[in-house]
Amino acid sequence: MHSNRKSSLRIPQKKLRKPSSLRATPKNKKWWRFGLSEGALTKTKLFVGVLVTLVALVTGLLTLLKVHASDEETFKRYADRIVAWHYKTELWHGYFSNFFEGIVNLEEMNLSNDSSMTLALQASGNTIDGGMSEKRLCGIFPPKDFKLVRGTISHFGNSAEIQIYEFVQGHTKVYAEFKLHHDGLVLEITPKWNSRWFGRDTIRLIQHPESTIDTGFKEMEGTCKEEHARFREMLRESYERLVEEGALKQRTPPDETSSGASAPHQ
């Protein structure tokens, strides 16, 4: 009996003390100089940073208001610079295509070499306008070398949304919509869900350095020359058929009219 009791007794184990070098440091260690904890110090730094930012914004606003009161033209110039900086309008100016000679790492940009799309853009504030040329757009009656572009830039200027449109009989006709995104000098153009007749793939075009919207429109000239030629031929054939049917009277060429009028009467 006695021996059994002794054998069933639990002998408490001695707790091992951690070496002094392994002791955990307190989480909220007081900052030695001012007696602040690390958490309180972090909050103080954050508060000071927010306060400095607010003071800078208020100071800038008061400065702009002062400039506006004294010189509205100068105020407008400063305001335009701020808006241009915010929307990165310089990124949205110029001519965009799938090739530009002189860039050594052109292959690394993974441009859409199989696309005929080009863009001529300019920006003001958060708005974009310009033109787009693409062979599929040439098939829209009547054929033109480009269709018009309008759009809106997102905040901070990295992306935008545009519409491709034209005025038809006094009404705005939208043909396609795209999402735009900047990847350095490369502009990525992605068709939206209602414009999948352009495909689903993102088109990558490069911005031509120092180009303008006028440069772009000049480069677009002749994009639809084959379609223009077919359209003129179709008009000629329709006219001749109507003349044969008697619906129209044959028009006298200007050269013959002038020569006939100047001929002396016999």
Image: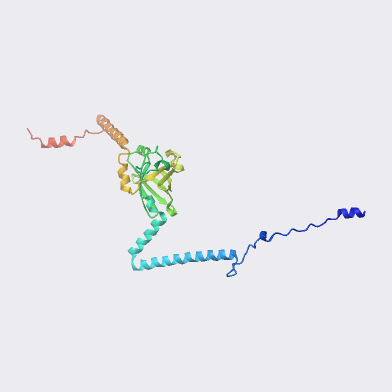
> Residue shown at 40%/49% (left/top)?
151
Residue 242 sits in which quadrant? top left
> Residue shown at 87%/53% (left/top)?
7
Visible residue check, residue 65: yes
Visible residue check, residue 175: no
Q: Nearer the viewer, residue 173 or 98?
A: 98
Q: Is residue 104 above or below residue 32?
A: above
Tell me where residue 44 appears, x and y as whole percent: 55, 66
Q: Residue placed farthest to the left in the image?
A: 266
> Residue shown at 69%/59% (left/top)?
19
- Quadrant, the C terminus: top left
Q: Residue placed farthest to the top in the image?
A: 244
Colour treatment of the image: rainbow
Tell me where residue 120 appears, x and y as whole percent: 35, 46
Tell me where residue 42 appears, x and y as whole percent: 56, 63
Tell me where residue 136 appears, x and y as whole percent: 38, 38
Is residue 50 left or right of 141 when viewed as pictured? right
Q: Nearer the viewer, residue 115 or 248?
A: 115
> Residue shown at 31%/46% (left/top)?
215
Q: Nearer the viewer, residue 7 or 127?
A: 7
Residue 11 sits in which quadrant? bottom right
